[in-house]
Image (cartoon, rainbow, N blue to C red):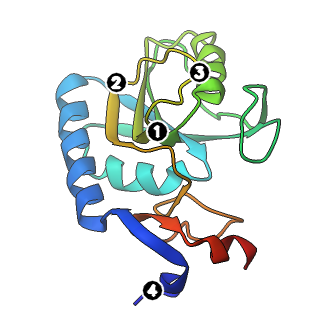
Amino acid sequence: MDAYADDIEKVLITAEEIQAKLAEMGEQITRDYEGRKLLLVGVLKGAFVVMADLSRSIRLPLEFDFMAISSYGAATKTSGVVRILKDLEHDLKDRDVLVVEDIVDSGLTLKYLLKNLAGRKPASLEVAALLRKVGIQQVELDLRYVGFDIPNEFVVGYGLDFAERYRNLPYIGTLKPAAYGS
């Protein structure tokens, strides 16, 4: 029993389902980038868990880099106006770049980020997202690799947090209403 068990209303995606999906995504990425060196770019903080496990399923030479971004606006909604808190250390010019995301909801922040990264002239720029919320995208995004489509619910676990908690859960779940006040 995990320490947060009393806060979880339901498990949407089990740890086993996540690991199987990441292995499948890793196999596809390995095939798609065969013979190339890939730079994985994780968007902090949530993507670090996804990126760590996904990278172990990619059988290619890999490099890692991270960005931290802040989206302005209300706490539950993104405005798409983004401030870069931590930028990349690698030069992207002529590199094959795969942005790793934990979750894509409105798509506004990711669209801004991709535009910013594309301006750095990578050879290729694609996205791998563990989760995509269905039916709430406000912009058209071409996500090359998507693990799971989920309903428009607030989820935690596997890198996703509420008030910096629950990131270390091995599954994706929803919170009981009482957990929002604790």
The percent coordinates of residue 78 (x first, y second) are: 72, 35
Q: Is residue 68 above or below residue 142?
A: below
- Mark 3 vs mark 2, CA separation in Å: 18 Å
Give whichever of discs 3 and 2 has the lower sequence position: 3
Q: Amino acid at mark 1?
A: Lys
Disc assigned to residue 138 = 3
Label whose residue precedes the other's in the sequence (1 or 3): 1
First reached walking from the N terminus: tag 2 or tag 4: 4
Mark 1 neighbour class, 10 Å CA radius: few under 14, some 14 to 19, many 20 or more? some
Q: Nearer the viewer, mark 4 or mark 3?
A: 3
Cα distance in 3D space between marks 2 and 1: 15 Å
Residue occupying image coordinates x 49% and y 75%: 8
Quadrant in which the N terminus is drawn: bottom left
Q: Name the amino acid, label 3.
A: Gln
The residue nearer to you, when weighing 127 against 38, is: 127
Q: Position of residue 20 (x, y in %)?
A: 20, 55
Instruction: Identify the residue at the far front of this view.
Output: 177
**In the rendering, at what x and y percent does residue 168 appear?**
50, 71
Residue under the point 47% across and 83% down: 5
Question: Picture quarter containing residue 72?
Answer: top right
Q: Which callout, 4 or 3, points at the residue further toward the start of the chain?
A: 4
**Measured along the vertical axis of the image, is residue 73 above or below residue 56?**
above
Return the mark for residue 144. Answer: 2
The foreground one among 39 and 16 is 16
- Tell me the kind of residue under disc 4: Asp
Question: Mark 1 highlights which residue?
Answer: 133
Label 1, label 3: how far apart the Cα atoms are: 11 Å
**Which badge, 2 or 1, comes first in the chain's sequence?**
1
- On the image, the x and y values in percent for residue 71 come to 76, 36
Which dot marks residue 2?
Answer: 4
